[in-house]
Amino acid sequence: MISHGYGRGIYFQAYSLCSALKKAQDCPVFFNTLYSIKGIAFAYTMVNGSHLDKVFLTADKLASSDLGSEETRCFHDGLTSALSFLEWNLPGLLESLEENKYTEKAREMVKSHRASGGLYRF
């Protein structure tokens, strides 16, 4: 959780998503780079919540960038986690979005959260 929070902080410190991701790859050894990337994705999604179509496009473009496959997967996980968080607080949000791999995974997460009685992790 601390590494996730560190990643969120990196996003707000950086001037761009690209520089935030670079900073995460060079994070201090006591932080987990992959969880930091999830935190960056979470913050990026929350900040750009009114432009989720662009968030999805950006996430898709990461797969063809210099970011590794594990890092890209973690970014996608952070994005879907943010979507499930938004759905938990704004019921019906996911239904208003065009279905894609991110919204589908977020719906599964929300279903799991509801079955377990709450939102316990990012």
Image (spheres, rainbow, N blue to C red):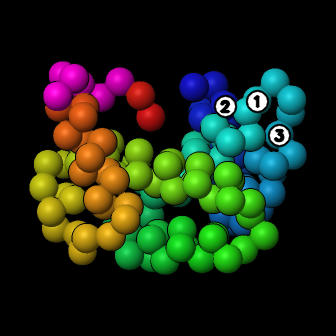
- Whether residues under marks 1 and 2 lie with C-beta atoms below 8 angstroms apart, the answer is yes
3 sits left or right of 116 in the view: right
Under circle 2, the secondary element is helix
Secondary structure mostly seen in magenta is: loop
Contact? badges 3 and 2 (CB < 8 Å): yes
How much space separates mark 1 and mark 3, taking CA atoms?
Answer: 6 Å
Percent across and percent down for residue 107 are 24, 51
Marks 1 and 3: CB-CB under 8 Å? Answer: yes
Left or right: residue 44 versus residue 82 is: right
The one of 33 and 51 positioned closer to us in this rendering: 33
Q: Quadrant of residue 81?
A: top left
- Is residue 14 visible to us here? no
Compared with 29, 21 (above or below) is: below
Say above or below: 90 vs 15: above
Q: Which residues, given as a range, are shown in magenta?
A: 115-120
* Callout 1: SS: loop
Q: Which mark is residue 3?
A: 2
Reading the image, the residue beneath label 1 is 31
**Screen quadrant of the N terminus:** top right
Q: Which amino acid type is marked by label 1?
A: Phe
Decide if residue 19 is on the left or right side of residue 4. Answer: right
Say which element carries label 3. Answer: loop
Residue at the spot 47% in from the left edge and 69% down from the top edge = 55
The disc labelled 3 sits on which kind of residue?
Cys
Mark 3 highlights which residue?
Answer: 27
